[in-house]
Amino acid sequence: MVSTRILERRLRERLSELEAAGLTRWMRPPSGIDLSSNDYLGLSRHPLLREQMADAVAREGCGSTGSRLLRGERDSLSELESRFAEFKETERSIYFSSGYLANLAVLSTLAEEGDVIFSDERNHASLIDGMRLSRARRVIFPHNDVTALAHLLREEDSHGQKFVVTESLFSMDGDMAPLGEYDAICRAHGAALIVDEAHAVGIYGPRGSGLLEVTRAEALVSIDTGGKALGVCGAFVSGPGWVIDSLIQRARPFIFSTAAPPAVTAALQASLTVIETEPWRRDQLLARSAYLRRRLMEAGMAVPEGVSQIIPVVLGENDRAVGVADALQRQGFDARAIRPPSVPRGTARLRLSVNAELSEATLDRFAAALAGALEEACSAASS
């Protein structure tokens, strides 16, 4: 029998270190009123999506049976990609089974050794991991700092391709990248802009296609997830045909992954239909988000200015964030604690995410419950 004593001891030590730092995590099913998920428009349970997905399962089965370059390709999937490309006003789109895979594919395929990637310091882990796989040199610039980015690009003397990578709406802080200014800077310095629209697609812009639509900035590609506001799963990469062709031929997360189940494509088609025909959902989402932000400020909580559906309440200490989240759970609200490495050390928080189905009365009750939980936590800390 192979000995694993060294491995077991090492892993147990790592787990003990996490526990001592207050960073142990638990998988807990949904319970209570949702203030933590990314189902911003409430589409995951929308009748049209459920109906279309169930019909597709009955018609096409549960699994795709292989990668898209084997037997996993379906007409329904290529039709969905064409529709999504129109939605994003790009030449082509390609679908991946997750946003993580999409980001790995884009960055590990497009950027190569000799290139330089300029990355916002608060970019998602999937973007960071994709950059590492690319073998390109990575330059980190301060969060949303246009001046610093322009300086770094101006000073860069590499003869390879330059890329600027950012989220459009940052998942932990709920703030937005200055995409229009980034577009101008990239044009001035010969850089290609890559934008992760995971938390913006479906919500922002006259058609709901994201913040690139709002700012009219031009990106080389955008990455748009299907598992947040769209209510299903997976992610699209949208851009020029030559980029999409390169991903099909060279991106390992595409070539070596089983294709999505055919029923998923039916649900995503329904998502796009709902976003087109029920714009009140995104209007109501942003109205409810503004309402909760205002109520928290009136209660004396330090929440940042902004308009997005993501509202961070930074508490600092890991144990304090977990304690406040647990107190809210006991009162019927599902708000979760976010701790390092998801956020910088010392900035543990509640990441409140509003959805369109929350009423003002519910948000009033939540604001009062959060104020009480914070007061209780302060009293416990001072005693």
Image (tube, rainbow, N blue to C red):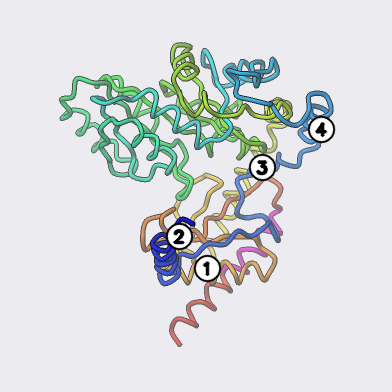
Q: Position of residue 127 (x, y in %)?
A: 41, 37
Q: Quadrant of residue 105?
A: top left
SS at badge 3: helix
* Quadrant housing the C terminus: bottom left
Q: Quadrant of residue 277?
A: top right
Q: Amino acid at mark 4?
A: Ala
Q: Amino acid at mark 3?
A: Gln
- Disc 3 from disc 2: Cα separation: 29 Å
Upstream in the sequence, badge 3 or badge 1?
Answer: 3
Q: Residues within 10 Å of mark 2 (few under 14, many from 20)?
A: many
- Please give the residue where the numbered disc 2 appears in the rendered image: 339
- Give the overall secondary structure of the magenta segment: helix
Given this view, does label 1 or label 4 mark the residue nearer the observer? Answer: 4
Q: Residue furthest front?
A: 1
Query: Of the numbered discs in the image, which one, if any, rests on residue 322?
Result: 1
Q: Residues within 10 Å of mark 1 (few under 14, many from 20)?
A: many
